[in-house]
Image (tube, rainbow, N blue to C red):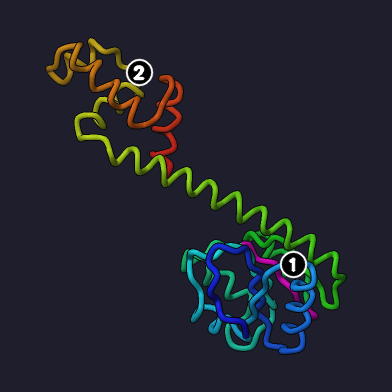
Amino acid sequence: MNVISDEARETVFIVDDDASIREGLCDLLDAVGVNAESFASAEEFLEHWSAARAGCLVLDARLPGMTGVEFQEKMKQLGILLPIIFMTGHGDIPMVRKVMKAGAVEFLTKPFQKLELLAAVKQAFAIDRARRQEEAILNSIRARFESLTERERTVMEMVTAGLLNKQIAAELNLSEIMVKLHRRHVMDKMRANSLADLVKLSERIKMQ
């Protein structure tokens, strides 16, 4: 087993109870410059897992103990969002349908071709990268919103609801000049270039 250590590097995490398969897959991925780490069980993987890691999971569907299919469900419960590539020597249609419906990237039947695995890993890496980028954007929006004062948040809510400055002023018992000042602060802190931008940011916050 390789020890999880390099958090910044995209990694293929291989979970299979067959040591020869783990070694073969690690050698294959290493030969094409892809970082790989392997584990004999889902439980062993969880012992070393860190949410800061990036990459994908190559998972045997029929592991002893907690099966790969069960582990897919467990990952969702734990909030582990790694894309999963399933592999098995004994797949069946109901199993394939179940894991693909639950979000698996691919289902490979052993023995599979090298290019099949590499194509699936490339796709899974792209999915994970896009998710992390979206997560970073949402974290940035959330941080900007949290920098607003309570009054600024109220003004933002009213502005994005379509109220005019004079309506907001009357509702909050403020002068229009003060409303305009709060509105400018909101635009600056949220880094919005237009009302349309601010509305989009507001919707993103509500969706979180």
**Relative to 180, 191 lies left or right:** right
Q: Position of residue 115 (x, y in %)?
A: 85, 65
Q: Nearer the viewer, residue 22 or 161?
A: 22
Q: What residue type is disc 1 on?
A: Gly
Q: Which residue is mark 2?
A: 162
Which numbered disc flags the more N-terminal residue, 2 or 1?
1
Q: Residue at x 35, y 18 (%)?
A: 162
Tell me if residue 114 is in the magenta stretch: no
**Relative to 184, 197 lies left or right:** right
Residue 16 position by quadrant:
bottom right
Q: Position of residue 1 (x, y in %)?
A: 62, 85
Tell me if residue 87 is in the magenta stretch: yes
Kindly report the secondary structure that dominates the magenta region of the rendered protein: strand
Label 2 crowd (10 A; few <14 / some 14-19 / many >=20) = few
Q: Nearer the viewer, mark 2 or mark 1?
A: 1
Q: Position of residue 107 (x, y in %)?
A: 75, 67
Which quarter shows the C terminus? top left
Q: Position of residue 12 (x, y in %)?
A: 66, 69
* Range covered by the magenta-colored residues: 83-90
**Relative to 66, 77 lies left or right:** left
The answer to whether mark 2 and mark 1 are in CB contact below 8 A is no
Q: What residue type is disc 2 on?
A: Gly
Q: Considering the numbered disc 2 on the image, is that residue within a helix, a strand or a loop?
A: loop
Q: CA distance from mark 2 to mark 1?
A: 53 Å
Q: Residue at x 51, y 79 (%)?
A: 48
Label 1 crowd (10 A; few <14 / some 14-19 / many >=20) = few
Q: Which residue is mark 1?
A: 33
For residue 64, above or below residue 153: below
